[in-house]
Image (cartoon, grey):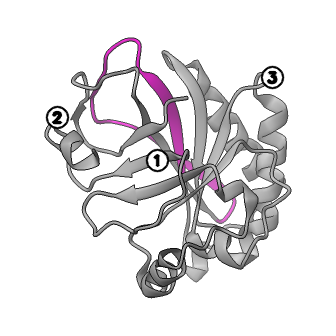
Amino acid sequence: MPKKILWAWEREEDLRFLNTKNFGVAFLAQTLYLETNEVIYKPRRQPLKLAPETYLIAVTRIETSRDNSKRPNLTDEQKNKVVSYIKKTIELPNIKAVQIDFDALSSERNFYRNLVLDLKKELPENFPLSITALTSWCVGDAWFGDFPIDEAVPMAFDMGADDKTIRDFLSRENDWNESLCRASYGISIDEPLIVNFKPNRRFYYFKSKAWAAVDLERIK
C-alpha cells in the first residue's frame, strides 16, 4: 500500500495524473444508511478516472438515522447485510483493500465491533482492512483495540469542538494512545496542517473539491 493516499469522495474525479508508485486512491464506493430495520444502499454514481495500475481502496460510508422515529435497531440481519455489501466491493476492478467510514455512537459500538469481526472472516486471507477513526477515539476513548484491522486512520481535520484540544495534543509531540491509530494520519489540505507528525506513517489526504495535479505541490 502506498504511503500517500487520496480520498476521492462522491464527485467526479479524474486522477490519471497521479504517479501510481507514490499514490493510491481510497474512493467512496457506496454509502449504507441504517434506519429502523433497514439497510438503504446508495452506490457511487460519479465517474472516477484512474490509471489502471492505481492501488485502490474501496470505502464504505455507514450512516445511522438521527431521527428518533427511525433510529436503527442494529439487528443481526442489518449487520449481515452491511457485511455482505462491503464484501461485494472487493469484486470491483483492481480493489486491493477495503475501508469502513463509520462515526459510531457509543450505543452503536457493539454493533460495529461485531460487524468488523464478521467482515474479517469473510474477506480473503491477508486482505487489508482499515477504518477511519475520530481523533477522540485515538487519544483517550480507546474502545476498539480488539478490532482485527490493519489500521485505524485518525481523521485529524474537521474536528469540531475537539479541534484545539487535538492540535495542542499533537503539537506537544504526543502520539495517539491507541496503537491501531499509529500507522497513518488523515488530513485535509483545506485546513492548516497539524505540525509534529510522527515519521514513516501513511497519509490519507482529503479535499472538499475535485483533485487537480497542482494539489500535489501542496502535499509536498
Alpha-carbon distance for marks 2 and 1? 17 Å
Q: Are marks 2 and 3 in contact (CB under 8 Å)?
A: no
Going by the numbered disc 1, the residue's amino acid type is: Phe
Name, please, the residue furthest toward the top: 52
Q: Is residue 177 above or below residue 49?
A: below
Q: Is residue 142 above or below residue 127?
A: below
Quarter of the image where the N terminus is located? top right
Residue 27 visible, this orientation: no
Position of residue 139 measured from the top left corner of the image (x, y, whole percent): 66, 75
Going by the numbered disc 2, the residue's amino acid type is: Ala
Position of residue 2 measured from the top left corner of the image (x, y, whole percent): 49, 30
Q: Earlier in the sequence, mark 2 or mark 1?
A: 1
Kindly identify the residue that appears in the image at 50 percent across and 86 percent down: 165
Going by the numbered disc 3, the residue's amino acid type is: Glu
Within-10-Å neighbours for mark 3: few <14, some 14–19, many 20+:
few
| Nearer-the-camera pick, 69 or 210 | 210
Residue behind mark 3:
125
Residue behind mark 2:
213
Residue behind mark 1:
203
Residue 186 visible, this orientation: yes
User: What secondary structure is found at the residue carrying circle 1?
Assistant: strand
Q: Residues in magenta?
A: 36-61
Within-10-Å neighbours for mark 1: few <14, some 14–19, many 20+:
many
